[in-house]
Amino acid sequence: MEPSQEQIADGLRGVHDHITTFLTEADGNACHEDQWTYDKGSGGGVTRIWEHSDLIERGGVNFSAIHGDSLPTAAATQFNIPEGTPYFATGVSLVVHPWNPHVPTIHMNVRHFSAGDVWWFGGGIDLTPVYPVKQQIIGFHQALRDLCKVHGQDYAKHKTECDDYFLIRHRGETRGVGGLFFDHMRDDRVKDFAFIEALGKAFPDLYRPIVEASRAESHTDAERDFQLYRRSRYVEFNLVYDRGTLFGLQSNGRIESILMSMPAEARWRYDWHPEPGTREAELTDFYLKPQDWCAMTD
């Protein structure tokens, strides 16, 4: 039997709680929680935030389930759905910006949308290291490949879509080392929902080994400075290209939840380039280009 809107929302609410439990344990501190209602329709959500905590400088995990009476004009045009069509959207999104430059930033979202007879699932996960460790990246991608195999998903396709989507075109570099990205997935409502729910539930197992291996590594002021510089790229992508951010703004979503993905601090420099042969140069010369990570060895 196909899951109803309420069953999909309940499943993603469970994903939200599951990830919150992991992040609370990993950080060592409880989150700040905001419950909110959607004032352009019905429903709402829960935003859970860590700021200036132990592991997490700024990060959070959102859950939302909203009903709208009329699809916004821009969204109706983009999705080729008649303007004024009632819609339902639910999902979980998270971003973690750690203090330590050696612990990668991570982003994930899983979502469902329906309007009239049109419906789809979407989401993805991607890793954005400042000082990459190749073996961690290989392990991350291999785990995603294995998860896709269990659920009959095409890892290579979703990986390529992730590399293409998280491309900062005006910089000619990817945002990070990729992961999975999929949108407008509507092959089988039961199987598609099972996949996005499993991806959400897998988040602790994907991120925990990376955090545990890197969080105790000491860092210099210069490495912290480079971290802030690289975060400016994250901000540029989210404000210029990110579809979720744009849809949230177009649909009059909750601004605090939409912009939760922004780091606490970022820094821009004029025409700065790292010294050749350094780890900072290696980031853009090798890691921020699409690679076949699963085929690599350390």
Image: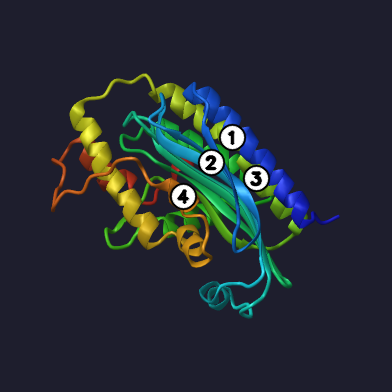
Residue 240 appearing in the image: yes
Q: Secondary structure at mark 2?
A: strand
In the depicted view, which residue is nearer to us: 249 or 217?
249
Q: Residues within 10 Å of mark 4 (few under 14, many from 20)?
A: few
Q: How many marks?
A: 4
Question: To which residue does mark 4 refer?
Answer: 256
Mark 2 vs mark 1: which is more N-terminal?
1
Amino acid type, callout 2: Val
Q: How many C-alpha atoms fall within 10 Å of the one at disc 1: few (<14), some, or many (≥20)?
A: many
Give the crowd class for mark 3: few <14, some 14-19, many >=20 residues within 10 Å: few
- Pick the residue in front: 113 or 264: 264
Quarter of the image with the N terminus in it: bottom right
- Per the model, the C-alpha gap separating discs 2 and 1 is 8 Å
Question: 38 or 194, which lies in front?
Answer: 38
**Where does label 1 land, which residue?**
19
Residue 206 location, x and y as percent?
Answer: 54, 34
Closer to viewer: mark 2 or mark 4? 4
Instruction: Report if the CB atoms under discs 4 and 3 are less than 8 Å apart.
Output: no
Asked which secondary structure carries label 1, the reply is helix
> Hey, what amino acid is under mark 4?
Glu
